[in-house]
Image: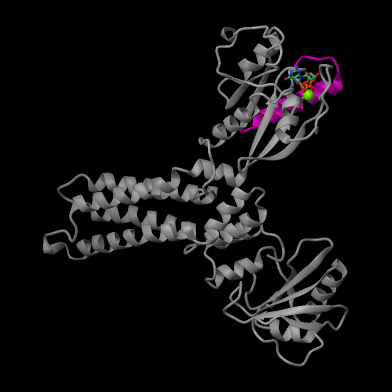
Amino acid sequence: MFSPDDTIVAIATPPGRGGLGVVRISGPASHAIARDLLDRVDPLQPRHATLARLRTVDDVIATLFAAPHSYTGQDVVEISAHGSPVVLRAIVESAMGAGARLAEPGEFTLRAFLNGRLDLVQSEAVADLIDAATPLQARTAFDQLEGTLTRRIAQIDRTLFELTARLEASLDFPDEGYHFIDPGDVRGALIAIAAEVDSLLGDARRGRTIREGATVVVAGRPNVGKSSIFNYLSGHQRAIVTAVPGTTRDLVSERIDLDGVAVTLIDTAGLRETADVVEREGVDRARQAAGVAALLLVVLDQSEPLRDDDRRILNETRGRDRIVVRNKIDLRRAWSDDEIGDRMTDVSASTGAGMSELRTLIVRELTGRESLRDAPAVSNVRHIALLERARAHLAHAAAAAGDGARMPEEFLLTDLQQARAAFEEVTGKRTTDDLLHHIFERFCIGK
Ligand SMILES: Nc1nc2c(ncn2[C@@H]2O[C@H](COP(=O)(O)OP(=O)(O)OP(=O)(O)O)[C@@H](O)[C@H]2O)c(=O)[nH]1
Ligand SMILES: [Mg+2]
């Protein structure tokens, strides 16, 4: 990848105007380059905010973080200027004129990783924290940044390391005629480790939904109140509501925070056969959106007799993750439960009745849990896949060790080594350039 000996520069604050803007420089030449930019002969004192004048324009505050006590582990200079894109670009260009190179996305954090300031879980957590759209997403990311998952994996790996060493000793001294460790103990130890991995994975689905968010689609025939429910859940009158069937033609989408889960809620055109070309296009889009949703809200209108369109939608969505929502419960009921045979949740988009129950139900369907207050240990699908792989090797080894009489050390060792390799890939002790590239390219420039 890119040489860590280059000195890199980038604007660290978001594009646009702001009260402050920060330019960050990292690398062996960063102090020299900063002194070149600033109209200043004295060296900067590490960790002292220093008021200085730029050679171009603006007064700035410059702070030197001397290696290794910086974000990247290298000499870093942060220059805080007024948040003008013109000023910030001028600083970057002067730094480039003085020998710096423009940073690639994520390159500061990549350096922090390569210099051992952060492991891979923590580096990924930096990106998650920046991307967080709900407080719970932020808390989950910060937990991982603080090293909670890293520590739990390190603990598992220590036990595995010890077990591996004893099995290897048994292999190295076969003539001693005894095992350095009792087969029963091996099995017990493996089962205990597998249980620890299970406890990490137990919450993985919820973790993943919290990290990635989920798409929820509101579907149903025209006029049942889809847009009204959509508006209620999103908290404002985003979609047009009228008494005319076929009002919604396009997909309307809103990001909402449901108890910490970042939900993309999508309102759709009412599903029915129609001769109107515009509406037909809307119906096609509704079907496509429903096809990829993590969860469907299938809306029925309890104030009117069920129609063929309702029954068709119920049939089409059977087997999908869905909540059947019976809307307009403020009006007289026109049909009975037996006509559906499905569990339903009752709401009124007009009065708001049942809406908080609906919210809770959505969260439960998406995460398997009703309350989400605590941050899950794992949330990243890469970590989940590796932990599952480690778990499979541990189970395989535990089964082999359980056979008793003659313990097949070689087989056990292969599985244990593969399990350890999976753990090391999570934390980044073992990586490939491809993996690093894949992880760091999703960062923004300047991070
Ligand atoms: N009484 C009552 N009326 C409702 C309720 N929800 C929606 N309505 C009314 O039902 C009509 C249709 O509501 P919409 O939200 O536009 O229905 P829709 O399913 O989005 O309709 P299309 O976009 O045409 O598919 C409007 O007149 C709403 O005011 C409810 O809970 N109670
Ligand atoms: Mg609508």
Residue 1 visible, this angle:
no
The location of residue 199, given as percent across then percent down, is 40, 46
Report the magenta residues as a range. 272-294
The location of residue 320, given as percent across then percent down, is 58, 25
Question: Relative to residue 296, is residue 137 depicted above or below?
Answer: below
Which residue sits at x=84%, y=62%?
17
Q: Is residue 186 left or right of residue 33?
A: left
In the rendered structure, does residue 354 fall within the stretch colored magenta? no
Viewer-closest of 308 and 169:
308
Q: Is residue 65 left or right of residue 18?
A: left
Viewer-closest of 332 and 320:
332
Tell me where residue 420 sits by quadrant. bottom left
The location of residue 219, given as percent across then percent down, is 70, 23
Viewer-closest of 192 and 339:
339
- Quadrant position of the C terminus in the picture: bottom right
Which residue sits at x=65%, y=69%?
108
Question: Relative to residue 258, is residue 418 depicted above or below?
Answer: below
Question: Relative to residue 327, is residue 38 depicted above or below?
Answer: below
Which residue sits at x=58%, y=35%?
363
Residue 242 visible, this angle:
yes
> Ligand 1 falls in which quarter?
top right
